[in-house]
């Protein structure tokens, strides 16, 4: 069975420090002013019962990624029979069809080259059996990575034990980034 990689982030322990963003930029040589991942501070509830949560957001590496299907050149594609979505810069024409198709605003245009880029779940590290750089660098260990098709993986176990949600599941993209609450 092919791997279905997922990231699970515990919003109770994420402190919004941004170490994941810095680790991603460093690991992937992301130019200044651009980010493959980011921190969102969200206030939930109604006054006076408000709570604040921090979320580390990125590409959701959807199992049915509309960005892949919208790409006219095949530049956006799945990596090695998994759900990890990559972009082949040499095939990308910069048409932005994938940007329009992505409900997570997870794509960016690399300047001055003009191709589209995004989070890769650090597939080069995953290929070596390592976690993505953002997961490895988290000081609170609120981020977890693994294969959802492996019932013994940490991500499968966390999703079985805890209440979770994905962002915008109604899109039908079948996102693979989950937030524990």
Image (cartoon, rainbow, N blue to C red):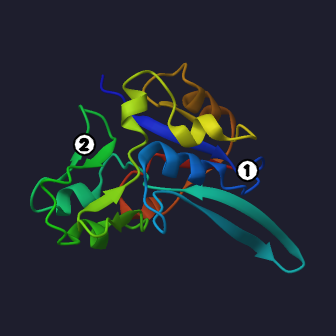
Query: At x 43% / y 55%, what residue is drawn?
Result: 30
Query: At x 37% / y 33%, what residue is drawn?
Result: 124
Query: At x 37% / y 36%, what residue is drawn?
Result: 123
Q: Is residue 135 left or right of residue 17?
A: left
| Rendering coords of residue 148 (x, y %) | 46, 31
Q: Quick check: 109 above or below 144? A: below
State which quarter of the image contains the N terminus. top left
Residue 78: mark: 2
The quarter of the displayed image where residue 70 is located: bottom left
CB under 8 Å between callouts 1 and 2?
no
Q: Is residue 123 left or right of residue 51?
A: left
| Rendering coords of residue 145 (x, y %) | 54, 34
Q: Secondary structure at mark 2?
A: strand
Q: CA distance from mark 1 to mark 2?
A: 29 Å
Q: Is residue 2 left or right of residue 170?
A: left
Between disc 1 and disc 2, whose residue precedes? 1
Q: Residue furthest left?
A: 73
| Rendering coords of residue 83 (x, y %) | 33, 40
Compare residues 116 and 80 and report the one nearer the observer.
Answer: 116
Residue 60: mark: none
Q: Secondary structure at mark 1?
A: loop
Residue 14: mark: 1
- Badge 2, how many Cα within 10 Å: few under 14, some, many 20+? some
Query: At x 42% / y 27%, what residue is drawn?
Result: 149
Q: Quick check: 109 above or below 126? A: below
| Rendering coords of residue 154 (x, y %) | 59, 27
The quarter of the displayed image where residue 3 is located: top left
Q: Quick check: 66 above or below 100? A: above
């Amino acid at each position: 069975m092919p791997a279905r990689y997922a990231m699970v982030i515990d919003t109770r322990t994420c402190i919004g420090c941004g170490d994941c963003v810095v680790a991603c930029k460093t690991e992937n040589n992301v130019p200044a002013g651009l980010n493959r991942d980011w921190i969102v501070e969200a206030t939930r509830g109604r006054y006076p019962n408000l709570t604040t949560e921090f979320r580390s957001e990125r590409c959701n590496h959807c199992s049915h990624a509309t960005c892949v299907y919208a790409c006219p050149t095949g530049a956006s594609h799945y990596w090695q029979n998994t759900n990890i979505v990559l972009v082949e810069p040499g095939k990308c024409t910069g048409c932005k069809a994938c940007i329009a198709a992505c409900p997570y605003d997870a794509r960016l245009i690399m300047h001055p080259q003009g191709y589209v880029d995004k989070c890769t779940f650090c597939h080069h590290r995953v290929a070596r059996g390592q976690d993505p750089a953002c997961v490895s660098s988290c000081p609170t260990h609120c981020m977890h990575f693994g294969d959802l098709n492996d019932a013994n993986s940490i991500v499968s176990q966390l999703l079985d034990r805890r209440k979770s949600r994905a962002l915008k599941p109604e899109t039908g993209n079948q996102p693979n980034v989950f937030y524990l609450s």
